[in-house]
Amino acid sequence: MSELRSACDTTSLAHVWRDGLWDQNVVFVQLLAMCPTMAVTTSGTNGLGMGLATTAVLVVSNMLIASIRNFVSSQVRIPVFVVVIATLVTLVDMSLNAWLHGLHKVLGLFIALIVVNCAILGRAEAFASKNGVLASAVDGLAMGLGFTFALTVMGLVRELIGAGTLFAQASLLLGPAFSFLEVRVLPGYSGALMMILPPGGFLVLGCLLALRRLIETRRAARTCSTQPAHRACSV
């Protein structure tokens, strides 16, 4: 019985992990957190920094809320969740200002706006308030890394087309240890300014959404070809 329960738990956590990274990706599927997604993805470095900061808040807030879920009444759960998230965001904001001041200056107000990020409050309400600490930690990590992946990819595409570089100023914003990420792909390239401006964010997001839809369509077609009797083939 214990082995069966362990196998079920592993399968459940794997499902949570896949949901966060791909099936229920915060940006590419749920279309949440559009404000930081459009505003800070002018480069891969900015997207990576914002994504990691949000991931830290997601993981810790999910764990704390899962820990206190049995002690908070349903009438006041939302205010309590907001207070927990706001406290963590304040700590992250102060930490970035102290140790990664360059990145803090670039991200600016958007760090404080993590408090009202729909993805964080949504995971607290939909998952952490109904599950244990371990599952909530995995959910927060998966959702955070999925969000980081989306922001980083968008930032890299916009930066490459807009300036011909990848992870520009990574050593200045994230620290000397990240200098290996800096790559100039197109030397002498004058850049396309529109990709750095807000319209470029919408264009890149639309193209990435279409690419994800294409991948899912082809995956479903392969599933149907290998399993003709699969229910999806009859839809």
Image (spheres, rainbow, N blue to C red):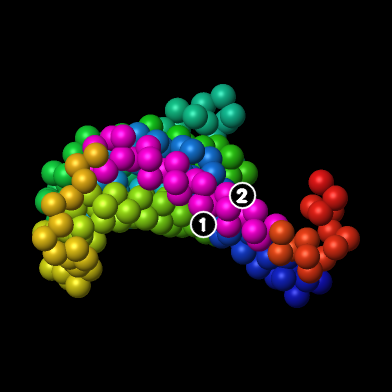
Position of the N terminus, as image quadrant, is: bottom right
Q: Which amino acid, by three-letter code, is at mark 2?
A: Asn
Is residue 175 rendered to the left or right of residue 213?
Answer: left
Which residue appears at 52% of the width and 31% of the height?
A: 77
Q: Is residue 159 above or below residue 227?
A: above
Q: Main secondary structure of the magenta part?
A: helix
Is residue 166 rendered to the left or right of residue 72?
Answer: left
Q: Which residue is mark 1?
A: 21
Is residue 54 rendered to the left or right of residue 74?
Answer: left
Q: Which amino acid, by three-letter code, is at mark 1?
A: Leu
Does the magenta run of residues contain 205? yes
Picture quadrant where residue 44 is located? bottom left
Q: Which residue is mark 2?
A: 131
Q: Give the foreground label among 2 and 1.
A: 1
Q: How many marks?
A: 2
Does the magenta run of residues contain 103? no
Cα distance in 3D space between marks 2 and 1: 19 Å
Return the residue found at the far bottom: 3
Which residue appears at 29% of the width and 46% of the height?
A: 41
Viewer-nearest residue: 22 or 186 = 186
Residue 141 percent location from the top left of the image = 46, 57
Viewer-nearest residue: 190 or 112 = 190
- The residues colored magenta run 195-220
